[in-house]
Image (cartoon, rainbow, N blue to C red):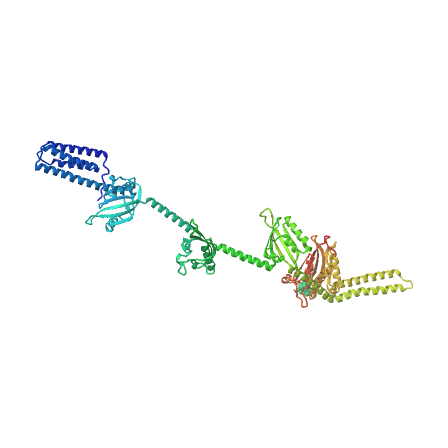
Amino acid sequence: MFRQGAAMTSSTDARVLFVLAAIVGVGVFLIDALTPLDIAIAVLYVVGVLLIASPGSRQAAIATASTCVLLTLVAFLMSHDDNYSGGSIARCVVSLLAIGTTSFLALRNQANTARLQEQIQLLNLTHDAIVAYDMSDRITFWNQGAEALYGWRAEQAIGQRIHELTQTSSSIPLDELRDAVVREGRWEGELQRVRSDGSTVIVASRFALWRDDKGKPRAVLATNNDVTVRKRMEAELQRQQDELRATIDAIPGMVWSSSLDGEVSYINRRWNELGISLTDGADGSGDVWTSIVHPDDWPAMHAAWRGAIATGKPFDNESRIRHSNGSYRWMHIGAEPLRCPDGQILRWYGVNTDIEERKQAEQALERSEAFLSDAQRLSRTGSIASRLPAGEMWWSDEVYRIFEYAPDYTPGIELILARTHPDDLALVRDAYEAGLAGAPYVDVEHRLQMPDGRIKHVHYVAHLAVPQSASIEYVGALMDVTERQLAQEALDRSTAELAHVTRVTMLGELAASIAHEVTQPLAAIVTAGDAATRWLNRAKPDLGEVGQSINQMVRDAKRASDVIRQIRAMAQKRDPSQAVLDLNGIVRESIELVRRELDAARVELEVSYAEPPPFVCGDRVQLQQVVINLVMNGAQAMAGVTGRARRMRIGTRLVDGEHGQVAIEDSGTGISAENVGRLFNAFFTTRADGMGMGLSICRSIVEAHGGRIWAESEEGRGATMQFVLPIDKGTCNEQ
Ligand code: ADP
């Protein structure tokens, strides 16, 4: 068993021992040398030797032993003169033997003690706290490390019960701990203890059991290391790790890390929430990607990932990732390598971010762009955005198609002008100038001339966008109206043809009326000629009467020639001409042309003319045709009417100071409510021999003159057909 040397005996103690030894030595010498006692008193020198040897000085012990031997011999010589008896010699020898033996033992003990002291010093050298205690937990050894660790000095600690002194607490009960030490002979673990200053310390302890020769447990040697700081650091590290993990788990993305060769070794909680675990590798290889990446995206993703691993370049990929419910969502998969200072890759860290919404939006955008592009292509309408005065432009694909430029051309007014028909250049430039001046709307229709000479018709409309900057921005549409234009021209042509056909058809119907009109003036001329001849053949010719007859003839001839001229005009196929026309005159002439028809149909005609006459700008024959058409329709509507007068009222009037109106009111069958709406549609007719083109042509003509035509009717009580034309304001282009 170890017992720590009663520390170093202090120098004071040593001095006291020396004095005591000297007293003992002197006393023994005096008694031995001067008294006649026949006892081996010199044996008592051993007390002095032991006293001197006890503080530990080897030299002093040897010197003391030698002195004692010398004193014994001196005293022997002094006390016996020459009278040496056998007994006295024997006593002297015994004393010398005793001194020698004691000195030898003392020196050996001293050597042992010194060795022990050395060992203790060595034990004190260690920073570990070394404590030994017996089986009743009483401390028997307490090194300096223990003093430093727990705060009690050795003399305070020795003899105390270790677990009581340090209030040991352990993860297992102390009794179990003792049993374990006795059973196993050793134990190691962490204990929490309380220092002398009341602070808590965590120690890593190693216990070793010492048994005596008979195998009986005698003591426990414990080495203890203060791991409080380490523990605190470990706890802090753990806390930081937990915090980091919680942070990583809180990231809405799928965070992961992989080994150098790309095998995923860590995934955050988000993965688990999506029902993915690291064991999901489809082929058991542990490669989680194979089972979660959409089969269509896997080859590209795999190749990109392998490429990143091979080159060490950041990984960037977009793939669909399968979720627990089986659905796939688009994710951005990005990873960066973690390198050690020498640049070698240690691991890969990645995060998958859900971009489903963005993808959907992108796809929707792509779709709508495709729709828009389709719609633009189908409608031949392109979009143009322009920023002025810089002249920057943006063209949609259709604009490029319309202008027939390759899509890599930078749009600009120069490109537009280069395609503009030379005759329309001024028009386009004016529109551009208007834009530069900030006009709220730009609306221009012009022609394009393609390099191969083809002509296109385009219509460009744009409006000033809400300004976002100081510059002027226009957003507009460019429509390729070539087909519409051609169709319109074709329609105009066919309308003219139809009008002609209608007129010619009508001519047949009116032939009798015209014949009558022409016959009547001719007959009148003949009659007047006869009369003039008679007045001349008198014995005394009456030249006044002759003159009157000739005037009558001239008037009638003029009327006949007018009728013929009109018939010719109607029969002629010609383009409309523009002239300032008296609306009253148009109505009057038209009535003259159909008067015979009206008479035959026994129509009572009532005509009223506006005063002053409204003047309009237009084509005489076309407008006559409108009136004739409406009058004839009225007459036809009244043809079947019995029991009431067939009355027709034709009137002109000025309305709102801007328009001249012609209204033809009949008392015919009237028009049903359902037919009123489609009366003016081409080929709408209720008559068995009707063509249904009359009103349609009327509308085309009236609208071409900037007017409007409509019908009002009460079924069964007749109808009023009317049209208005703008009054000429002196702008009519006479041709
Ligand atoms: P069509 O005379 O060859 O039928 P229109 O275009 O001139 O062709 O007339 C279309 C139709 O409008 C006629 O069939 C008739 O039913 C109706 N309509 C036109 N004018 C009148 C009217 N004054 N009263 C009643 N119906 C009319």
Ligand 1 rendered quadrant: bottom right
Q: Is residue 14 above or below residue 182?
A: above
Q: Is residue 171 left or right of residue 433?
A: left
Q: Is residue 284 above or below residue 50?
A: below
- Visible in this render: residue 625? yes
Residue 207: give x, y in percent of width and height: 26, 47
Q: Is residue 526 above or below residue 727?
A: below
Residue 424: give x, y in percent of width and height: 68, 55
- Residue occupying the far bottom of the picture: 688
Image quarter (top left, top right, bottom left or bottom right) of the N terminus: top left
What residue is shown at x 81% (from left), y 65% (from top)?
Answer: 522
- Residue occupying the far front of the picture: 82
Image quarter (top left, top right, bottom left or bottom right) of the C terminus: bottom right
Residue 395: give x, y in percent of width and height: 60, 54
- Visible in this render: residue 444? no
Considering depth in this image, is 292 or 110 the residue closer to the camera? 110
Q: Is residue 348 left or right of residue 510?
A: left
Considering depth in this image, is 100 or 211 the residue closer to the camera? 100
Considering depth in this image, is 297 or 205 the residue closer to the camera? 205
Residue 134: give x, y in percent of width and height: 22, 45
Q: Is residue 7 left or right of residue 100?
A: right
